[in-house]
Image (cartoon, rainbow, N blue to C red):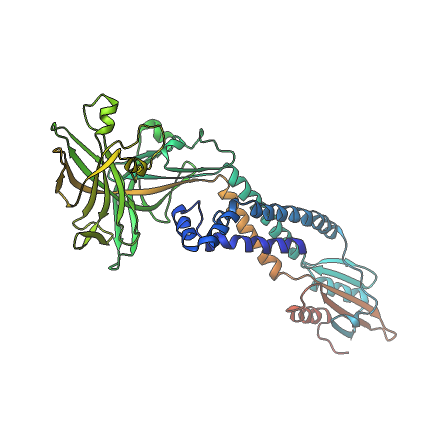
Amino acid sequence: MRTALTLLFLLALAAMPGALLPQLSLNAAKVDEYVAQRGWWGQLLLKLGFFEVYATPWFAAIYLLLFTSLVGCLLPRTWEYFKQMRAKPVLTPRNLSRMPHHAELVLDVTPEEAVGRAKKALRGWRMETGDGTVSAERGYLRETGNLVFHFALLGLLVSFALGKMFSYEGQVIVQADGGQFCNGGIFNYDQFRPGLQVDGTDLTPFCVEIGKFSAEYLDNGQPVGFQADVKYQSGEDLAANNWRPYTLQVNHPLRTAGDRLYLLGHGYTPTFTVTFPNGEKRTQGIQWLPTDQLTLASEGATKFDPPGVTDSEARRKGQIAVTGLLAPTPLLHGNILNSKFPAVNNPMVAVDVYRGDLGVDDGRGQSIFSIDQKMVDQGRLQKVARKNLALGEEVVLDDGTKVRFDSVSDWVSLQVSHDPTQGYVLVFAILIILGLGVSLTVKRRRVWVRATPQEDGRTLVEVGGLARTDQAGYGEEFTRLARAVLNEEKS
């Protein structure tokens, strides 16, 4: 038990960095910022795994040792408890006056009547009667609650372990006003974290369509709430193409097909139209990433291929990227654009337009939020224009290409969480609370009664009591039992 308590304390201590420090699984950008600000100290914490606490070997070691210790503690205690439940109450001691609680009285009754009165007063107790004696014991539920608490804790640990094996979690950005997402495979996600036994080929099928998105802010820009009107289908609805409505809010997930769909946040998608020298147009909107969570000033890159060009070399030389800053509510300091509020009020963009080889055809993955800086450094991608644009405004490049800022729309960030053990975790958590409550409120106590005949024909009735654990609160109960047995008669 001492070992288990020590390990439980170490587990709580080891979990503290997970609550106090940013974690890679939740916000990798915050971790990078934290490490950069703290130099060698941040690098040391990164190497020791303090930014991914729950996946480190040292956390798993404490977890497994606690599991082993609990098993080693519970097995002998359970066997001992089983033997105690079958055992008879302890025989009446010779000298009851030495008990912490004691009362005696000489009564005008026979020993048999005194024993009968004691049995009546102790109804509901576990009793064993002898020759003029009664032994009674109560409070076995205390140990029951204790065992329930520890077995539930063991079950909780097992559930968490199984959850890590068979659960998965993924994030995806979906455009509002008609954007759809289907849980058909890991390639539909922007980020995906599978459990140890999840390979991504057998995900729970469901689809969701994002309708109108709305956000409410305080005057200082702090968000009050996000809400997205969605439609979803799962199970038989997929085959029947039947959509069900739901209002998705932060901390109010959609639960369907055993998965939970969370609304994490939102951002903006600027839409640009590029008119090429031959008159052909390309319109595209790609989500930009908020760099300031308070004002939702966002940065990104919207990339275009020239139309009608079949030669790959010529096509790569004519690719266009529109990069820069989107300000939902613009704030200008000269020509420097920033945002002063997260809602869309006459939005503007400060754009840098690049032309050349974007490097999207070299077989390597590339962020949708930025261009490949190596292509710029090599001179294969060149900046050809810079300008602040309001809605409807355009910038004209040196070859006559026009880039127009058309509109701003919302995107939402969704998280899909699948954990088949969450029901078991809830049950074990409730059992932990119930077991702990029972073990703290119920007390083990014993009562003995001895009836000894006297020479004058009367009977000396002695009552002794002992609380096996804490005696607090037992005095009143013993006094009440003693009065019932002795019947408050005078000698």
Question: Where in the figure is residue 91, as x and y percent of width and height?
Answer: 80, 60
Q: Is residue 205 visible?
A: no
* Left or right of 88 in this view: 253: left
In the drawing, does residue 20 fall left or right of residue 155?
A: left
Residue 472 sits in quarter: bottom right
Q: Reply above or below: 171 against 439.
A: above
**Up-down relation of residue 335 to residue 447 (above or below):** above
Is residue 23 left or right of 455 when viewed as pictured? left
Q: Is residue 308 visible?
A: yes
- Say if 262 sits above or below 303 in the image: below
Considering only vertical position in the picture, is 279 above or below 410? above
Tell which of 457 and 287 is nearer to you: 287
Q: Residue furthest front?
A: 378
From the top left corner, tell me how far across and down residue 235 is, in percent: 39, 31
2 vs 372, nearest the viewer: 372
Residue furthest to the top in view is 310
Q: Position of residue 415 (x, y in %)?
A: 38, 42
Query: Front-most of 221 and 452?
Result: 221
Of residues 458 and 286, the one nearer the viewer is 286
Identify the residue at image location x=54%, y=45%. Answer: 56
Snapshot quadrant of residue 134: bottom right
Instruction: Find the residue positioned furthest to the bottom.
Output: 491
